[in-house]
Amino acid sequence: MKNKETEQILLNDEKYEKLLHEKTKAEFCKIIENTSSSPKTITDYKSVPRNMRFGKTTIYLVINKTSKTKSYINGIQAEGFIDSNTQREKLLDGQVDYFVNGDNYIKFYKFKSCVNS
């Protein structure tokens, strides 16, 4: 009896497509449930991967000394404030997590990773 039902499903393309769609959907939902999509936040600069220290998911705090204001920028913008290659290398190597550019004090704030380790 089961073989007869399977044969009928295979002969009827619409039922087969529906069955295939349901199976794929169930597998996809199972994969989604097993993975956690919540971003991981890192506040320790040395824990941030070297290649992501100036990425768009890395946040830096900028304090302006003259106007006494605070703002936040991403790593790409922070890299634009760097004056010298030695300063950049110290940041990439994790020796320091801040630098000064003119009236701006720029310090690492946090990093958000979408991939959980």
Image (tube, rainbow, N blue to C red):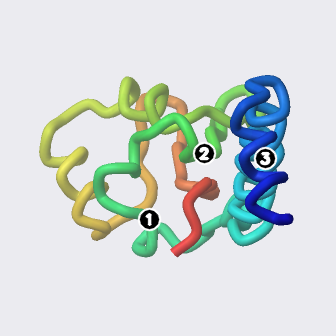
- Disc 2 versus disc 1: nearer the observer: 1
Mark 3 Cα-neighbour bin, 10 Å: few <14, some 14–19, many ≥20 = few
Q: Are marks 1 and 3 in contact (CB under 8 Å)?
A: no
Sequence order check, earlier mark of 3 and 2? 3
Task: Tell me if residue 100 can be seen.
Answer: yes
> What element does badge 3 sit on?
helix
Comparing 38 with 45, the one in front is 38
Comparing 43 with 26, the one in front is 26
- Disc 3 versus disc 2: nearer the observer: 3
Relative image position of residue 107 (x, y in whole percent): 54, 52
Height in image: 37 above or below 67?
below
Comparing 103 with 12, the one in front is 12
Height in image: 112 above or below 56?
below
Height in image: 35 above or below 112?
below
Q: Quadrant of residue 114?
A: bottom right
Per the image, the residue denoted by label 3 is: 25
Horizontal side of residue 32 vs 88, given as left or right: right
Per the image, the residue denoted by label 1 is: 48
Per the image, the residue denoted by label 2 is: 59
